[in-house]
Image (cartoon, grey):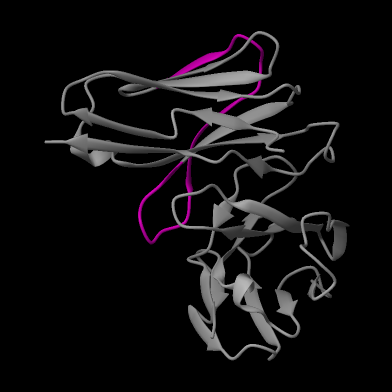
Amino acid sequence: TQLLEQSPQFLSIQEGENLTVYCNSSSVFSSLQWYRQEPGEGPVLLVTVVTGGEVKKLKRLTFQFGDARKDSSLHITAAQPGDTGLYLCAGAGNWKTSYDKVIFGPGTSLSVIP
Amino acid sequence: GAGVSQSPRYKVTKRGQDVALRCDPISGHVSLYWYRQALGQGPEFLTYFNYEAQQDKSGLPNDRFSAERPEGSISTLTIQRTEQRDSAMYRCASSQERETEAFFGQGTRLTVV
């Protein structure tokens, strides 16, 4: 059973469109991280959210941590082909697993078509 | 080093052979993680260390898999009597301390034939 779920699994959009991907769990995490992974490379951290209700912006990317610290969303405005990749959420500080283990969701594969 | 280094980058081995995958983390990083990743999927947790102590090995699939980090730096993931289902990308990551940003290596692509 996945502790973290992500949706959608696949997303293909036209350049310039907006999109939102979701990361959900039935468990509370101390923090959630979002990573982006390009083919052949390892995941690279985009942002860490810690406080329930927190919103962080990184250029065209907006990240939100749910009030209950069980879910998070990533919104991309005016998507560009360079945004193509696998977007992964990762949770840390979950009492069900072990406090400081970082576990990953299954990912959302995004393709932005020029 | 500048980043997390894994070796070998590619390993092809015959079924039944043992393999050892090496991870050299960023200098000074306390936490070291091993993950296995299928194409297009998120990394699947295998095990992790804080310093030399193996904190959690609940993700290791069976007793053919083991890992060590004897001096709190370099780590080795060993798979004994490899099987075809062990074929995957094995990724190592390190972080400065618990729950902080994980930096990933390039991975070792293991193919068991």
Q: Is residue A93 above or below residue A51?
A: below
Q: Position of residue B60 (x, y in %)?
A: 78, 62
Residue lying at 62% horizontally and 71% vertically, measured from the top left: B85
B38 left or right of B33 in image: left
Q: Position of residue B102 (x, y in %)?
A: 60, 48
Does A48 appear in magenta? yes
Q: Is residue B18 above or below residue B102?
A: below
Residue lying at 63% horizontally and 88% vertically, measured from the top left: B15
Does B93 appear in magenta? no
Q: Toward which corner of the image does residue B52 lie, by quadrant?
A: bottom right
Image quarter where the C terminus of chain A lies is top left
Q: Position of residue A61 (x, y in %)?
A: 36, 23
Q: Is residue B31 visible?
A: no
Q: Is residue B101 visible?
A: yes
Q: Toward which corner of the image does residue B62 lie, by quadrant?
A: bottom right
Image quarter where the N terminus of chain A lies is top right
Give the residues in magenta. A36-57
B59 left or right of A47 in image: right
Residue lying at 85% horizontally and 31% vertically, measured from the top left: A95
Q: Toward which corner of the image does residue B70 lie, by quadrant?
A: bottom right
